[in-house]
Image: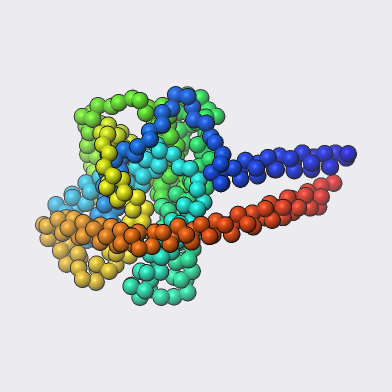
Amino acid sequence: MSNFEARSAGLRMAWAELLLNSNEYFTGKGHFAMPKHSTVQKERNSSLEILRLICIFHVIFWHSAGPYLNQISGSNLGDALIINAITNNTNLIFMLISGYFGIRFNLEKLIKLDLCIIFYDLLFMFLTGNFGLKTLITCFLPITFENHWFVSCYFVIALFSGFLNRIPEALSRTSFRNLLLLLLFVFYVMPTVFFHELIEDTGKGVVCMTIMYLVGRYIRLYLSERHFRKDRLAILFFGNLLVISTLNLALTTASGTFMGMYCRDNSIFIVVNAVCAFLFFREFYISIPLINHLSQSVVFLYCIEGYMRQIFNRFVDLGAHVNDWYFTGTVLVYAVSVFAACLLLHEVRYFLLDRFDGFLANRIMRLVNSVTPAVKRGYAKLHDNVLILISK
């Protein structure tokens, strides 16, 4: 056998093993052993589900106030700075919770999630009258555009979750901790201190979300049995909140426009507050089935709250109250109404179409499974032909 044939055969065997392992991974048949010191929590902690619901409300609240930031002044400006510091850790908390419980790739569930998002995009396209070819394309490819950036990040992390979950297993606790510290320094400390981002996405991208997912894994694997004092977590949270608000106030005063640089998703201050909030709520253990059910709507509420606000804005003009002393209260009532409307809409859709989503997702999975062997064979043939073409 020639050297080329030997190398090709070896590569074929390696790829065959990889494809076999990935097939087990993608079909959910694979088993990834957890470290012996980890614990498995069978029931979902409703206190963390309450935190998820609070976070999605914070998203709606801040997005509702966002368009008017450069118009507000006086006490409303102070309110906005504090609210920004409180609410802008939501994306990080979502990923901390995902990492804590762990994501397991399930293509059928992701397809079902995608179908639901497509439904909402099409529904609100008609309700808002935003017709057009580009809009229609983005409706059918929701996770490939910026419309739903957080869901796109979730899909990517879910796709690589089998590999991400193995990182703690391949590294010692010290090595894993050092890796996280290095990642936090490069992607969070540097943007906070120097306002310089290696990836210019203000932290709203797959890199920073993946880091938070890994931080959640670390907490689960090494700190799940450790308890923290809630009063000290609260002091750290509100002390850090005061620092953030003061720094942003200084920037806002100097620039003459609203500045929230220290509240970005890649701010180390926001990381500290996100971890504090997560650990604080984790210290409470309660089980409420209704809360656990409602929290499953969070990802969908994230996708539709912007559409719902467009509809509400046809009847409510927040801008007319931007200089009133009760502006913050007006936004709060507005946000609660949007939150309730989104939740009600999704519950109605869940009741009517959830089974159909599952049926359609299952049919799509059958189609995927039927063409997978042919795709693998085609890839193997293409792989060998390319090697022959480029080898001496």
Q: Is residue 328 left or right of residue 209?
A: left
Depth check, front residue: 342 or 353:
353
Q: Look at 59% across and 42% down and name the residue there.
A: 24
Q: Position of residue 117 (x, y in %)?
A: 41, 61
Q: Position of residue 155 (x, y in %)?
A: 47, 51
Q: Is residue 168 visible?
A: yes
**Number of residue marks:** 0
Q: Look at 50% across and 53% down and name the residue there.
A: 108
**Quadrant in the picture for residue 192:** top left
| Colouring method of the image | rainbow
Q: Is residue 310 left or right of residue 374?
A: left
Depth check, front residue: 42 or 125:
42
Above-or-below relation of 364 to 241: below
Q: Look at 30% across and 26% down and name the residue there.
A: 227
Q: Position of residue 278 (x, y in %)?
A: 31, 37
Q: Which image quadrant: the N terminus?
A: top right
Depth check, front residue: 180 or 136:
136
Above-or-below relation of 293 to 268: below
Above-or-below relation of 266 to 116: above
Q: Position of residue 172 (x, y in %)?
A: 51, 24
Above-or-below relation of 325 to 16: below
Q: Is residue 234 left or right of residue 203?
A: left
Q: Is residue 273 visible?
A: no
Q: Look at 52% across and 47% down and name the residue there.
A: 159
The outermost residue toward the right is 1
